[in-house]
Amino acid sequence: FVAGSDYSGLVHVWDLRTGRKVNEFKHYEDESAAQNPVVRSMSFSPCGTALATGSDDSAVRIWDVRGLGNHPSNPEYAAIN
């Protein structure tokens, strides 16, 4: 997998073997915010089961990406502030 983000606060994940987007998920929780935080950094764990994302609001989230691509819902995450 490869991951990237945009200025909307979404994280997009693609399968490198197929070139298809397999999921996208929100780094933010507040849908009513005037401006969503921009994801500035991300890294997969060495084993590939977690993705860490960091945004300009100082939030870090560790996403459980096991089974990514098998379901369209947001993966579980742990927030670190």
Image (tube, rainbow, N blue to C red):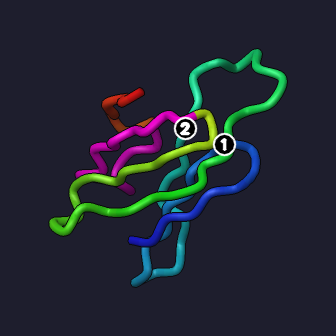
Quarter of the image where one finds residue 56: top right
Of labels 1 and 2, earlier in sequence is 1
Say which residue appears at 53% left-offset and 36% top-offset. Answer: 58
As drawn, 31 above or below 52: above
User: Residue 25: where, in percent of width, then height?
Assistant: 53, 42
Check whether the beta carbons of the residues at disc 1 and disc 2 lie within 8 A of each other: yes
Q: Which residues fall within the magenta stretch? A: 58-73
Res 27 label: 2
Q: Secondary structure at mark 1?
A: loop
Q: Secondary structure at mark 2?
A: loop
Kind of residue at badge 1:
Gly
Res 74 label: none
In the rendered structure, the answer to whether residue 26 lies left or right of residue 52 reads right
Q: Can you identify the residue that label 1 sits on?
A: 9
Kind of residue at badge 2:
His
Say which residue appears at 38% left-offset and 71% top-offset. Answer: 1
Quarter of the image where one finds residue 6: bottom right
Say which residue appears at 68% left-offset and 45% top-offset. Answer: 38
Dominant secondary structure (helix, strand or loop) of the stretch shown in magenta: loop
As drawn, 65 above or below 18: above
Callout 1: few (<14), some (14-19), or many (20+) C-alpha neighbours within 10 Å? many
User: Residue 41: where, in percent of width, then height?
Assistant: 52, 58
Say which residue appears at 80% left-offset and 30% top-offset. Answer: 35
